[in-house]
Amino acid sequence: MTKYNFMIRTLSPLHIGSGEELKLNYDFVNQTSIDKEYKGTGFTWRLNVDEILASRANDRNVTKTPAQLLNPADFVLDSAGNPNRLFRYRIPGEIRAGKVYSQLRACVKDVLDCPYIPGSSIKGAIRTALAVQILKAKGADLKSKIKFQSNSKKADDEIEGTLFGPDPNSDWMRAFRISDALLPPENRRPGYGLLVANTNPLTANPNTQKSVPIEIEAIQWGNEFFGFVTVDDFLLGKESFLPAKVHLDRWIPEIHEYGMNRLYLLKDWYSRVPDSQKILKKIDQLIQFGEDVREKNLSMALLQIGFGCGWDGMTYGELLQKDLPWFSHMLKDLKVIKPNKKKSGGGVPSVIQSFPTSRKVVYQNEIPADFLGWCLLDFTEVKS
């Protein structure tokens, strides 16, 4: 059994959703909604609804929202910069839409409202990275293994079975046990490191109208989380895993190679999309940093995790796009995209050539400013 301690540093806003949709005036309020004269980026205050209802019992009215039970004097901070008990936490940033039905997607947090990165999310990203690297090295023909006319979620079952094992008990990823990544003890407090990020799909077609913005709680770049990985060397030594052994023996560099290749692919995509200058600059910085890591052979890896990875970041998308006509057929058959009935002919539609046609990015002042989910993973083997 080999054990590694690891650190994850966020290099761009990171969102792992809890599945909870927070509602304006019921779960949170904006700085500008309580102070019309406020000038600045604003803050979002997460309401402690139980405490509000308990302390304002005499003012309770079925027509009032929890936010309407508050007074301007309630929005104060103590000497440590924390709000009073009527609020769970306060974070920088505001949602763009100010309507009463506006929502904010919550980031996953523990029972104390402290954000963390689930081990399952880390393991899922690592699983995809290793799978793509192994399939690329084998030169596998995935076209013959995709099952059409079936549930799209089961279309790659044959690939999964060949790659990881015929059943969950035979899956070699069982050998990797990855803990949740937690903030250091001194930073474990409600809402630490979070902000409100305004996201929207960035499309290659400048005439395409923006869809409804998705407002999220996200972990700010530059925060560090810590956890550990245990690798069952005995399980990885099983004969059935030998075809993948060369990759699993150097799993950290393989993850980094996958991340670097993905950055180059993203650079190519964004270079063809208007208004992507800030994002391209960030990509160039990450590529330079990643090349330094590769040269020094450090136990580090760049990897994209969570919301914003997109379809191609969670599948074998890169390997499926070598044959564009076949790829077009696959996307339509599995209903990943809807066929354009207005166009006919044997050519490959432009929507396929640039697939995916949009990516969710962070906007600031209506300008695309950052992409999502990029992290640095730094592993240190624990010597017994």
Image (tube, rainbow, N blue to C red):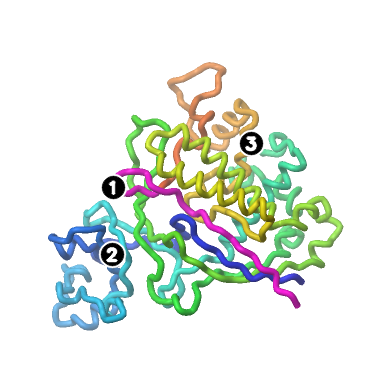
Q: Position of residue 324 (x, y in %)?
A: 60, 28
Q: Residue furthest right?
A: 239
Say which mark, if any, is on residue 70.
none
Tag 2 and tag 3, C-beta contact below 8 Å: no
What's drawn in magenta, residue-wise? Answer: 362-384
Q: Nearer the viewer, mark 2 or mark 3?
A: 2
Q: Which residue is the site of mark 2?
A: 44
Q: Secondary structure at mark 3?
A: helix
Q: Is residue 336 left or right of residue 123?
A: left
Q: Residue at x 75, y 43 (%)?
A: 137
Toward the viewer: 49 or 300?
Answer: 300
Give, as a three-letter code, the residue at label 3: Leu
Q: Is residue 342 left or right of residue 376?
A: left
Give, as a three-letter code, the residue at label 1: Asn
Q: Is residue 355 above or below residue 124?
A: above
Q: Quadrant of the C terminus?
A: bottom right
Q: Nearer the viewer, mark 1 or mark 2?
A: 1
Q: Is residue 125 left or right of residue 20?
A: right
* Label 3 packing within 10 angstroms: few (<14), some (14-19), many (20+): some
Q: Position of residue 369 (x, y in %)?
A: 38, 47
Q: Secondary structure at mark 1?
A: loop
Q: Position of residue 353 (x, y in %)?
A: 53, 28
Q: Which residue is the site of mark 1?
A: 365
Say which mark, if any, is on residue 320.
3
Q: Nearer the viewer, mark 1 or mark 3?
A: 1
Q: Is residue 209 above or below residue 197?
A: above
Q: Residue at x 41, y 67 (%)?
A: 193
Q: Residue at x 15, y 64 (%)?
A: 35
Toward the viewer: 49 or 72?
Answer: 72
Disc nearer the start of the sequence (1/2): 2
Q: Position of residue 142 (x, y in %)?
A: 70, 38
**Magenta-colored stretch includes residue 353:** no
